[in-house]
Image (tube, rainbow, N blue to C red):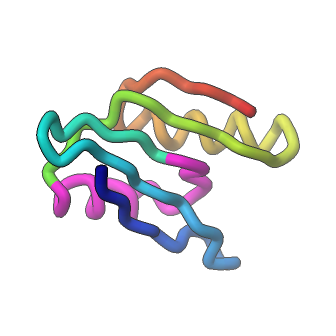
Amino acid sequence: MKYHIIPVTAFSQNCTLIWCDVTKQAALVDPGGDPEKLKAAIAEKGVQISQILLTHGPSRSRRRSGRNGRTLSGANLWPG
């Protein structure tokens, strides 16, 4: 298992990209904003996003984060 932290939004909030080194299946944790930054990190690591995990935030923020992540990947969304 590997991970990469991606600072997103004007507040530099942490989005974490977690993936299996063997299968290249990955999850985005709290994707927030900056979809172009997320796309670049996903491409750089050569992974396929299958899950999006949202750990916190108001429902409006969770919906926006989920839309950003699914736009990038078509992955399952797991709000917390």
Image position, residue 35 (x, y; %): 44, 55
- Name the residue at 41% across, 26% down: 75
Q: Residue furthest front?
A: 1
Q: Is residue 31 magenta?
A: yes
Q: Quadrant of the C terminus?
A: top right
Query: Overall secondary structure of the magenta stretch?
Result: helix
- The residue drawn where x is 61% and y is 54% is 32
Give the magenta part as a residue range: 29-45
Foreground of the two, 1 or 24: 1
| Snapshot quadrant of residue 23 | top left
| Extreme-right residue of the structure | 58
* Vertical side of 59 occupied by 3: above or below: below
The reply, left or right, for residue 10 in relation to residue 60 is left
* 20, above or below 79, in the image: below
- Horizontal and vertical percent position of residue 56: 78, 46
Q: Foreground: 2 or 17?
A: 2
In the current view of this chain or complex, which residue is farthest to the bottom?
A: 11
Name which residue lies at 58% across and 67% down. 14
Provide residue 30's location: percent of width, then percent of height: 60, 50
Residue at left offset 82%, top offset 48%? 57
Find residue 38 and report its horizontal and vertical position in percent: 38, 58
Say left or right for 71 vs 67.
Answer: left
